[in-house]
Amino acid sequence: MRSETWFTADLHIGHKLIAEKRNLPDSAAHDAVLAMHWDVTVAPADTVWVLGDISGGGRGSQQRALDWLAARPGIKHLVAGNHDGVHPMNPEAHKMMPAYLEVFASVQQSARRRLAGRDLLMSHFPYRESRASDDTHSRFEQWRLPDLGSWLLHGHIHSSRQLGDHCIHVGLDAWGLAPVSINKIAVMVDAAEAAGQASSADGT
């Protein structure tokens, strides 16, 4: 069977406040729902890119999230978020790296892959000044990528909105608390580009 590639972000395992925002009674129920969605979606040979925030932060919270992830199927890669101790904004990121590399095949600040001849970038954060973002804080500005024309997959915003300017939000809040497939991403990119070309042709 052919393997698939999936994307997700903002797991926030064990995070009580996020569980409440997602209308789940507590963090245990939240984590169980996420596990159910992951386990029925991802096969052992599949690849999953997690675009940041596996927990709410704190060393113990992160380790519990790593244990949760270790129990999930798939080959996992992390693009770190602001709640992940391995993000370079954390001056002691190197101290958490060994624990993360026991679970993730790679850990990066950002990443790039090819999708049907296009560059597809990945970051926890949306592009600078992106209308896909409802985050009004500027404290992470230096960690955001500039929009130079490539499509960006991101998390961070905890919104139900999936599509922005050259951005696709892959966070759980936009996808029914489940990972989204690269095939779905490709369809969205094709449709957005076709709509943009049609608008240009119409002069709108």
Image (cartoon, rainbow, N blue to C red):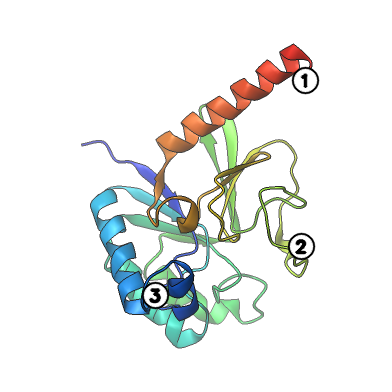
The disc at residue 141 is 2
Where in the figure is residue 187, as x and y percent of width and height?
A: 47, 30
For residue 191, above or below residue 47: above
> How crowded is the residue under tag 1: few (<14 C-alpha within 10 Å), some, or many (20+)?
few
For residue 109, above or below residue 47: below
Which label's residue is closer to the chain start, 2 or 3? 3
Tell me the CA gap for discs 1 and 2: 32 Å
Q: Quadrant of residue 202?
A: top right
Q: Closer to the camera: disc 1 or disc 3?
A: 1
Where in the figure is residue 31, as x and y percent of width and height?
A: 34, 71
Q: Report the quarter where the C terminus lies.
A: top right
Per the image, label 3 sits on a secondary structure element best described as helix
> In this view of the protein, which residue sits in the foreground, 91 or 52?
52
Evaluate if marks 2 and 3 touch, with contact meaning CB atoms under 8 Å apart: no
Q: Which residue is mark 3?
A: 65
Tell me the CA gap for discs 1 and 3: 47 Å
Q: Name the residue rendered at 43%, 39% in the picture.
A: 182
Which residue extends farthest left? 1
Q: Quadrant of residue 63?
A: bottom left
Looking at the picture, which amino acid does disc 3 mark? Ala
Which label's residue is closer to the chain start, 1 or 2? 2
> In this view of the protein, which residue sits in the foreground, 69 or 201?
201
> In this view of the protein, which residue sits in the foreground, 13 or 65?
13
Say if residue 186 shows up in the picture: yes
